[in-house]
Image (spheres, rainbow, N blue to C red):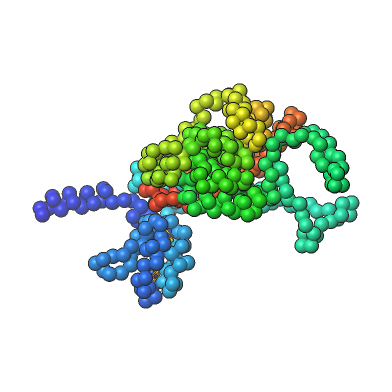
């Protein structure tokens, strides 16, 4: 090769070498004396960071693909692996912090918006962790939770201002007041919504079974409900989101509650996108979309542009479900959440679900996930106060969503998942 040919090759290599190759976050240390080349790590790493090298006849790895989950380390039979942070330091600069530089490199390598799943790991104060619980000692008899049963049953739905209770024939109290439909839970905790397609069928079925066993409810998310899970309907909330995936009459009648998803805490004002590679035959049948086609959820419901429009959808769903189940409306925690909640209560919803900015997601632009919205504790206080001030607090139950959704992807991660976004530490 000529001098110029060599130079051209050198420049080309430099130009097209991914920046992330040198600025990855984690290092995989493999102890050569301990490794027995069993390939467990190759099979267990869903990011394909470990691979079998045919020429060298041994297991090798690519540090740039590691996201630091430590799965391979935990499952290696000979404890040959050690996953550690890359020690490389950046020059101190409070504006250009390492985390921002790393994300710019990742974005430059992929050429796309950095997406992230789960809940935001950003260090926003968690007010719940600072909450102190009061206890009764003298005027009310105290309850010893180790020896006495505690009542945790919860009913979600509108409540009357007064109830009329009479003694029944068997001497037990009976409620005379007719209540609107309620969602009955044995414990005051539910599964957050996760859609079939974003998570796989086994996990959806596992949630249905777990909700049934514990007397709580799981939520289909926006992906519809597979027919084989209809039998868990008493513990299922079926969701109606902007894409209307899998929504039909049988579906609306299959659950113990219906949720209209207007917003999501991890990405307020943003829709969803399930890549076509995740739409297999089961997902396609359940969502009612062609196999392999992308499932796009628009940011808004295209038939809801006012509280009056929302009212129409709420009552359409009440009609469809013959007024037998409560209707919930899910919104993201944002600055005017209290006014929105007031409108929702007045539109006839039975439950308002407020999703805080730490809420989970299958995928969202990482900048949005980590920087948009307000914490659930602040939103909840605002909503509760506003509804009380307006004298309509009894018209709705309020559900708080805040934590990360536990997610298992139903197929191998897309290209963006291999270049995980790094969340900024607090200033
Ligand atoms: S799991 Fe452990 S022993 Fe097996 S190939 Fe990987 S590093 Fe080697
Ligand atoms: S820590 Fe997780 S991502 Fe990294 S190599 Fe191991 S299994 Fe793969």
Q: Residue at x 78, y 57 (%)?
A: 149
Q: Which one is in front, 248 or 259?
A: 248
Q: Quadrant of ligand 2?
A: bottom left
Q: Which residue lies furthest to the right in this view?
A: 139
Q: In this view, does 309 lie to the left or right of 114?
A: right
Residue 92: image location, x then y, percent: 46, 52
Q: Which residue is drawn at 76% across and 52% down?
A: 151
Q: Which residue is drawn at 81% across and 36% down?
A: 176
Q: In this view, does 100 lie to the left or right of 238?
A: left
Q: Which one is in front, 94 or 325?
A: 325
Residue 266 visible, this orientation? no
Q: Residue furthest bottom?
A: 33
Rendered-image quadrant of the N terminus: bottom left
Residue 288: image location, x then y, percent: 44, 37
Q: Which residue is drawn at 55% across and 45% down?
A: 230
Residue 360: image location, x then y, percent: 54, 46
Residue 83: image location, x then y, percent: 44, 64
């Amino acid at each position: 090769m000529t001098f110029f040919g060599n130079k051209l090759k050198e420049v080309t290599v430099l130009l097209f070498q991914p920046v992330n190759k040198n600025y990855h976050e984690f290092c995989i240390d493999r102890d050569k004396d301990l490794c027995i080349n069993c390939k467990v790590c190759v099979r267990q790493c869903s990011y394909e960071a470990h691979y079998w090298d045919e020429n060298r006849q041994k297991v090798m790895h690519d540090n740039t693909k590691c996201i630091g989950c430590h799965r391979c380390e935990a499952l290696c039979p000979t404890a040959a692996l050690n996953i550690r942070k890359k020690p490389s330091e950046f020059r101190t600069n409070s504006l250009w912090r390492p985390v921002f530089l790393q994300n710019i490199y990742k974005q430059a390598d992929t050429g796309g918006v950095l997406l992230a799943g789960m809940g935001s790991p950003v260090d926003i104060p968690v007010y719940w962790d600072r909450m102190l619980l009061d206890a009764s000692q003298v005027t009310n008899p105290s309850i010893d939770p180790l020896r006495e049963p505690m009542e945790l049953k919860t009913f979600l739905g509108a409540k009357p201002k007064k109830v009329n209770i009479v003694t029944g024939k068997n001497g037990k109290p009976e409620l005379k007041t007719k209540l609107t439909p309620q969602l009955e839970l044995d414990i005051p905790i539910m599964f957050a919504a996760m859609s079939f397609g974003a998570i796989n069928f086994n996990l959806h079925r596992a949630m249905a079974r777990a909700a049934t066993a514990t007397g709580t409810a799981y939520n289909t998310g926006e992906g519809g409900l597979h027919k084989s899970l209809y039998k868990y309907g008493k513990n299922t909330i079926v969701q109606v989101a902007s894409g209307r995936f899998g929504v039909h009459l049988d579906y609306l009648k299959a659950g113990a509650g219906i949720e209209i998803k207007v917003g999501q805490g991890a990405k307020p004002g943003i829709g969803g996108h399930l890549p076509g590679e995740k739409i297999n035959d089961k997902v396609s049948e359940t969502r009612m979309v062609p196999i392999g086609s992308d499932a796009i959820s628009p940011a808004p419901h295209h038939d809801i542009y006012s509280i009056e429009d929302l009212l129409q959808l709420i009552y359409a769903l009440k009609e469809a479900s013959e007024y037998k189940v409560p209707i919930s409306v899910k919104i993201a925690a944002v600055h005017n959440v209290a006014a929105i909640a007031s409108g929702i209560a007045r539109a006839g919803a039975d439950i308002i679900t407020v999703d805080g900015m730490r809420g989970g997601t299958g995928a969202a632009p990482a900048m949005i996930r980590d920087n948009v919205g307000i914490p659930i504790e602040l939103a909840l206080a605002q909503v509760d106060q506003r509804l009380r001030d307006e004298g309509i607090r009894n018209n709705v139950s309020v559900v708080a969503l805040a934590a990360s959704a536990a997610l298992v992807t139903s197929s191998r991660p897309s290209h963006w998942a291999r270049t995980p976004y790094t969340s900024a530490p607090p200033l």
